[in-house]
Image: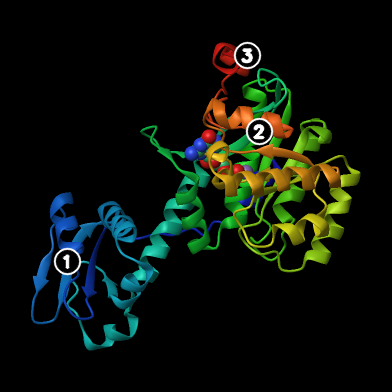
Amino acid sequence: MSLDRHLIGTVPQTREAAVLQLYLWFPIVIDRAVVPFLDQEGIPFERSMAENRLRFELPEPQLARMLLGLGDRLSVEESMAIKALRLPPERQLAVSDLSKVTSLRELIVLYRSRWLQNLLIKRQLTTHFQPIVHAADPTRLYGHEALMRGVTEDSTIIPPLRLLAFARDAQMLVQLNQAAQQAALMDLGRHGLKHQVFINFNPSEGDDPFLSLHMTCRMIDELKLDARRFVFEISELDPIADVEAFRELMLGFRQAGYRFALDDVGAGYASLNLLHQLQPEFIKIDMGIVRGVHQDAHKAAIARHLIGLAQDLGIQAIAEGVECREELAWLQAVGVDFIQGFLIGRPAAPPADPRDMQPVLIA
Ligand code: G
Ligand code: MN
């Protein structure tokens, strides 16, 4: 498939010696978080107190695991302050090597990119689907939100935030999102889902915000799926560079039958502007406002006004993160259109059927 070639074509090939030496120099004292981690993981190292330096001689896979672990434990600032040098095994450190010293941060980014490239090449992405139901009858399914997950060889599920953080570091957001959207379309068929599909889409990735969307729509065409089933969720957590251009591009997709939702409304800073600028077909009210809405006068006022605003503008409102019956009852009374949340079903593959929830929802 053409999309595959695009994906793999962008992955640089690398070849490394089996064992590498690594030097790490610490700015003042060797970070107290680092040594306990190395001990706990049983990673051998040689320590020079005089130079505030650690030296490792590790097989590359172990080196990679260590660098990923350090990446999780150190802040960006900390890893930038630590100097790093990789050398072939048994090579003595020479003055000429000093020009090759980088920061530990650079090495972490390099190994994070490799890890992510490997995941994409092996297609270790899967999709969990979370039901979105009609508020007036929560046993009636309206559609599903497709949520990306990584899945490693030993079936460990990797949360999307980790994948996105690695992809941002590696400047691979476009590839990751495209692969996730591709996986979502395949998984949709695998589970025989027939309703609406909400797909997350991040407009601030890469140079062309619509590149991955174009690819996804081409695949929807190729799979002979109905464009009117698809809603693209625009996250407003990252600012959109050129809203005017963005809105014009949306037009083409709308003419083909696609619809848009503004995601996380209430959590960002520009949602009200984006409402009139982008005129989405749906808003998704952020779970920060929804959770406990029945017992918090401020959240209640905000939610009521957002839902009223949506109604005035002819936009359908989806409440996200509904976890208890009291929240559901409050939202039904105020007239929200759709409900999503753990009360109805967690993201899962295959997704829970809301008809099985009847006793909980009606009691
Ligand atoms: O921002 P976005 O709408 O894409 O967020 C969806 C995320 O919210 C998913 O990762 C999902 O696991 C999580 N989520 C969905 N429903 C609930 C809920 O009822 N409670 C909590 N705490 N998280 C939820
Ligand atoms: Mn979303």
Work out which quarter of the rendered image holds the C terminus and state it.
Answer: top right
Residue 260 quadrant: top right
Comparing marks 1 and 2, which lies closer to the viewer?
Answer: 2
- Where is residue 169? Give x, y as percent: 48, 63
What residue does disc 2 label? 331
Residue toward you, 145 or 287: 287
First of labels 3, 1 by sequence position:
1
Sequence-earlier tag: 2 or 3: 2
Q: Which x, y percent locates residue 222? A: 79, 35
Q: Amino acid at mark 2?
A: Leu
Q: Which residue is mark 1?
A: 32
**Please, what is the three-letter code of the amino acid marked with disc 1?**
Arg
What residue did someone put label 3 on?
355
Position above or below: 200 against 134: below
- Look at the image and name its color scheme: rainbow
Can the viewer see residue 5 in this picture?
no
